Amino acid sequence: MEYKPVNDVNEMGGKVVFAEDVVATIASLAAAEVEGVYGLSGSAFEGLGEKLGKKNYTKGIKVEVGTVECAVDMTLSVKYGYRIQDVCQNVQQAVKNAIETMTGLKVVEVNISVTSVVFIEEKKAEEPPKPVEQPNRVK
């Protein structure tokens, strides 16, 4: 795949510029689809927006975007029972593929910091409630 500057003037006489949040959102959605990822981790300040009802797809992601290349730093939590190295490699590949396919930018690095391993308890099948017996009524 040939990478050409996306922020330069194109044949149509205009130019395309990607905001860092756009690339970060693509990275977030790609990482969320990888098996073994519990979620992205961010600072307490980033979590404040979610408490106020705003979904923040860029939480835990820092992106540097150039004219041809970009770099991604991610912080995430992994589910217990998954091999962390495999999960991280799968995230790196998924993020790289998604960004390069959607934007045409070359991803030079995807750095991942694992901040926690999350244990998820399996819910046991609940037994249906027993019917309550009605007392015999005399008519």
Image (cartoon, helix red, strand yellow):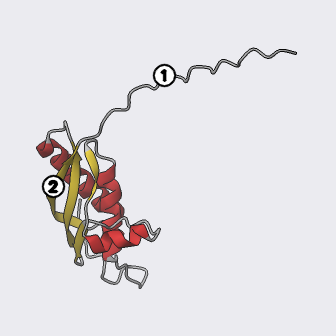
Residue 25, image x and y in percent? 35, 65
The outermost residue toward the front is: 138
**Residue at 33% from the left image edge and 48% from the top image edge:** 33
Q: Which mark is residue 65?
A: none
**Badge 1 local density, few (<14 within 10 Å), some, or many (20+)?**
few
**Badge 2 local density, few (<14 within 10 Å), some, or many (20+)?**
some
Q: On the image, numbered disc 1 is attached to which residue?
A: 127
> Disc 2 or 1, which lies upstream in sequence?
2
Residue 19, image x and y in percent? 34, 77
> Image quadrant of residue 10?
bottom left
* Location of the C terminus (image quadrant): top right
Indicate the amino acid at tag 2.
Answer: Val
Left-right relation of 126 to 27: right
The outermost residue toward the left is: 85
**Residue at 30% from the left image edge and 36% from the top image edge:** 121
Residue 3, image x and y in percent? 23, 67
Q: Secondary structure under badge 2?
A: strand
The answer to whether residue 114 of the structure is visible from this angle is yes
Indicate the amino acid at tag 1.
Answer: Glu
Is 2 or 19 nearer to us in this picture? 19
The outermost residue toward the right is: 139
Report, in whole angstroms, how far the alpha carbon at label 2 lies from the one at label 1. 38 Å
Left-right relation of 133 to 137: left
Is 97 or 29 nearer to us in this picture? 29
Left-right relation of 130 to 93: right
